[in-house]
Image: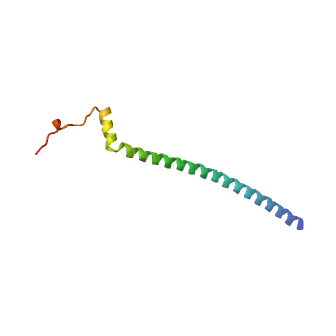
Amino acid sequence: MLKIVNLLLIIASLINAVYIINQRFIARQLYTQLAELQERAKLANDEYTRLQLEVGTYSSSLAMQGYASANLGLIQADKQHVVELR
């Protein structure tokens, strides 16, 4: 009877050891995945910040004037070409 109890305790200990090893392996995999996702989030945040700066740059009036004159052929109107409507 004592041998059966000892055998059951050894089997239970081995099953517990395999379970713990498996849980640690899963935890390491999840930690690695978390680190990768945090890196991707950091890169996305950096890209978002860069795009906000770019939007701010291109929405300024000087940028619009430069684009209008360079790409659309528009020029700044002078007093001879301005008509006042009443």
Q: Nearer the viewer, residue 12 or 77?
A: 77
Q: Residue furthest front?
A: 79
Q: Is residue 55 left or right of residue 78?
A: right
Q: Nearer the viewer, residue 21 or 48?
A: 48
Q: Is residue 4 left or right of residue 51?
A: right
Percent of width and height locating residue 60: 34, 44
Task: Name the residue at 59% across, 48% down.
Answer: 36
Percent of width and height locating residue 6: 86, 65
Percent of width and height locating residue 23: 70, 57
Q: Quadrant of residue 2?
A: bottom right
Q: Quadrant of residue 83?
A: top left
Task: Name the residue at 34% across, 40% down.
Answer: 63
Numbered circles on residues, count: 0
Q: Is residue 77 left or right of residue 36?
A: left
Q: Residue furthest bottom?
A: 1
Q: Is residue 57 visible?
A: yes
In the image, is residue 13 above or below residue 63? Answer: below
Task: Name the residue at 74% across, 55% down.
Answer: 21
Q: Quadrant of residue 57?
A: top left
Q: Residue furthest left?
A: 86
Q: Is residue 10 left or right of residue 49?
A: right
